[in-house]
Image (tube, rainbow, N blue to C red):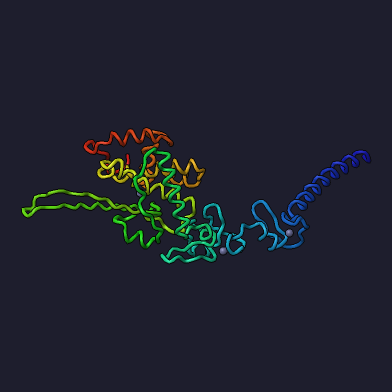
Amino acid sequence: MGKRRLIDDHRFWLAFVCCVCLLLAGWAQALDCSVCGSQIEGRFLRTEDRVFCSETCYQSILPKCELCGQPLSTAVIIDGRHYCEKHAEGSRCWKSGLPFAVGVELPDGRWFSRESYRQGVFDPAQAQRGYRLAAADLQRVTGLRMTDLPPMSLVGLDEIRRRRDYEPGDTMIERGMYARRQTTTRRVDRRGRVLDQQISNESEILLLYGLDRQEVLVTAVHELTHHLLAEHFPRFAAFAPLWAEEGICQYLAAIVAQRRGYTRLVEQIENSPDPVYGDGYRYFRRLYGRNNWPAIRAWLDDFDHAHGLPGQAP
Ligand SMILES: [Zn+2]
Ligand SMILES: [Zn+2]
Ligand SMILES: [Zn+2]
């Protein structure tokens, strides 16, 4: 009888030890703060997978607003960066599209973050240097000369908007403009018969101030391509739908950006959601690949407006 009691006690003891083990394990796991490791007594905070001894330890693991440093239990994520709601709803930098704490207002009403402002080109002489580099790059890639470089001025968005004759789409980024004016001068005799006639062209390029140096160069290549097309492929420049012309300007801008290692701008051109600029560029890339000016040139030489291209990029 005595022997039997001993066995019972033994079983009971084993079971008891197991319960204590489980309790201890649970205790140790649940009540060590996930941040500072100190033992938790009394009230504590927990998330799905962590426990915290205090509000301070809990807040230390939260993402912080990039601008004010406030810990965020609800964060607004823009371009992979975290912001509090107040800053996410506030003004955004024209260039980066990101919220800013202290911005700079440009004369044309655009707001820049200080960082974008520091990178911006506002000095006309610096812009002219970028412009000449762009012209040299474009002539090297195409093997075509431009008889004279159109004068370039660095202007605000207000000036570009005043001068342009189209409504930009939401997905279009306005960074520059090419303007060409044709003047026909006729000499007539008393009966109104034309004795001779002279056609002269005046071209001009506007670049937006505040772009960074890479953007100045790539935008200048784009605008100069309009000029190159007008000079060397006048039939195309006169009759092609807008998407085809803008598509070729973006195509050359992408080649130059690629050669210079401006990957951010290459990606921007390739992924543009714009139906004119983006789809226009992708039409030629589909046909000829990324870097094939000779094929584009042959296509331009063959261009016949009688056959027509669709009004929208196919
Ligand atoms: Zn703690
Ligand atoms: Zn904030
Ligand atoms: Zn253009």
Residue at image point 36% right, 35% down = 296
Image check: 11 left or right of 238?
right
The image quadrant that residue 2 belongs to is top right
Position in image of residue 129 (x %, y %)? 46, 52
Residue nearest the observer in this picture, 98 or 231: 231
Q: Is residue 169 visible?
A: no
User: Is 16 situated left or right of 155 in this image?
Assistant: right
- In this view, which residue lies farthest toward the right? 2
| Residue 136 screen position, x and y as percent | 43, 44
The number of numbered badges drawn on the structure is 0
* Residue 241 drawn above or below residue 183: above
Question: Furthest residue to the left?
Answer: 191
- Location of the C terminus by quadrant is top left
Report the front residue among 219 and 57: 219
Q: Position of residue 100 (x, y in %)?
A: 53, 62
Q: Quadrant of the N terminus?
A: top right
In the displayed structure, does residue 5 sit left or right of residue 191? right
Q: Quadrant of ligand 1?
A: bottom right
Nearer to us in this view, 85 or 279: 279
Q: Residue at x 50, y 47 (%)?
A: 264
Q: Is residue 144 shown to the viewer in this render?
A: yes
| Left or right: residue 23 compared with residue 258 | right
Q: What is the quadrant of residue 33 in the picture?
A: bottom right
